[in-house]
Amino acid sequence: MIYLYNTATRKKEKFKPLKPKKVGIYSCGPTVYWNQHIGNMYAYLQWDFLVRTLRYLGYKVKWVMNITDVGHLTGDNLGDADSGEDKMEKGARREELSVWEIAGKYIKQFLESMDLLNIARPDVLCRATEHIPEQINLIKKIEKNGFAYKTKTGLVFNTTKFRDYAKFGRLNLKKQFSGSRVEIDPEKKKPWDFLLWVTNQPNHIMQWDSPWGRGFPGWHIECTAMSTKYLGKRFDIHTGGVEHVLVHHTNEIAQAYGAFGKKTATYWLHNGWMLLTGKKISKSLGNIVLVSDLINKGFNPLSLRYLALTSHYRRGLNFTWESLNAARNALNSLYQRMPELKKASASPKKKQHKGLIGIYQNKFIELITNDLNLPKALALAWKILKDEKLADNEKYKLLIEFDKVFGLNLAEAETPKLIIPKGIEKLVQLREKYRQEQKWREADEAREKLKKLGWQTEDTPRGPRVKKK
């Protein structure tokens, strides 16, 4: 049985899909007006872990993700998604490219980042600009049901028609919107009413004909239109960042009620933020780090994936270069062990500890089904490596199985080339000589010297294994 924390109820709930062993997931994707940084990618890593977990447990998953390439306005950064200029146009002006070229450029960067982090491609990756008819048809339904009205700015959703509008975000609407809006349409009935379709913007580059005039969709409508197109009016899971709760997902729920009289998703999951040395990662602060930057600094990008595994998705993560370096060292240690474990797995002589293997498998399932407790699942993998009761071939089998969720490519691991200075090699050999002669005090002194020099040894049946601290 799987338990997931549902933002809609603010509690951990037993997961019951609408159809047995089938799961529909919709994830809010990127606005492609600029590079996706490691903070953005942290969210997609966490939802990749979710998809992998469900598939590992035998569910057939259909994963849908949108790409926003129109309608997301800069006012969203200031608490008002209906004000400012289109982020795509801002990006185009910044780089002196067309909005379509900007979209293409940053979709490519996003997909490359996904591949480098071994994030599985969603089954459906859908662009807002390629689903304008679906958005218009959805807005028609909302209007027909009496949930919309016209202003000089466009067609607006009437939140007073949805009594539970503030329930999902647990909003104090007057406090939430007081003084935070850059521009208030004086024709709006409530300042938190939001645009479904924007008109009377003659300078906006991307525009389409509609029953309400030539214009473009509001940001929120695309997610409701595309999620229901590919997953149906009811589906299982909707994911996004915690920043989506108060406005974007609140508005999605309102739109669905206006069109269908009910919520679309049963479970709403939200990831916490990745911070950079305690600060929010943002373009305005100029502290952007890209996945490609990690490579330029000599890191395997899967080190970031490993680091993400050490954090629970709801808590987020404080990224530091020191923590990434520690993740790299841990991942390299795993990679270093895998070839010898793999070699043992090919041996005709294999120990069988079926009971112990079963205990580890069950424990792993217990952890990942408890709201994706991946940090403890990763710790379990290290426990397996240290368990002397398990043979190497059994350790290999378990780790490869767990990696279906971790996605660290352990099966492809090769021993990293470690260049050991001659002085360190001599010291290791000297310590081994002392051990053979049972001169324990001298052997301990040699070990301490190695530690001070930044090296450590691990005694194995095949002799000492040396690694960098």
Image (spheres, rainbow, N blue to C red):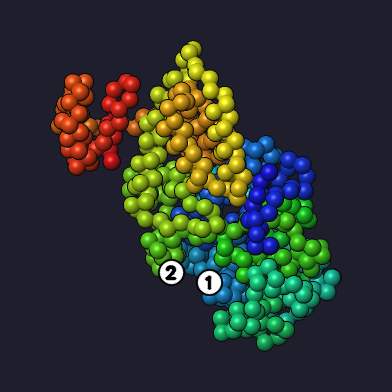
Q: Is residue 463 above or below residue 143?
A: above
Which amino acid does the dot numbered 2 rest on? Ser
Q: Residue at x 64, y 75 (%)?
A: 171
Asked whether the beta carbons under mark 2 and mark 1 sit within 8 Å of each other, the answer is yes
Q: How many marks?
A: 2
Place of residue 423 in the rendered image (x, y in percent of width and height, measured from the top left) = 15, 32
- Hey, which residue is sitting farthest top in the picture? 348
- Residue 102 appearing in the image: no
Disc 2 from disc 1: Cα separation: 10 Å
Place of residue 66 in the rendered image (x, y in percent of width and height, measured from the top left) = 63, 55
Which amino acid does the dot numbered 1 rest on? Asn
Q: Is residue 369 above or below residue 101?
A: above
The residue beneath circle 1 is 77
Q: Secondary structure at mark 1?
A: helix
Q: Residue at x 60, y 48 (%)?
A: 370
Quarter holding the N terminus?
top right
Quarter holding the C terminus?
top left
Q: Residue at x 74, y 76 (%)?
A: 159
| Quadrant of the rendered image containing residue 355 | top right
**Label 2 CA crowd tier, 10 Å (few <14, some 14–19, many 20+):** few
- Residue 232 appearing in the image: yes
Place of residue 450 in the rendered image (x, y in percent of width and height, measured from the top left) = 20, 37
| Quadrant of the rendered image containing residue 154 | bottom right
Q: Quick one: label 2 or label 1, which is nearer the N terminus?
A: 1
Q: Secondary structure at mark 2?
A: loop
Place of residue 347 in the rendered image (x, y in percent of width and height, measured from the top left) = 46, 15
**Label 1 CA crowd tier, 10 Å (few <14, some 14–19, many 20+):** few
Q: Is residue 443 above or below residue 180?
A: above
**Mark seen at residue 284:** 2
**Mark seen at residue 372:** none
Direction from residue 406 to residue 422 in the image, left or right: left
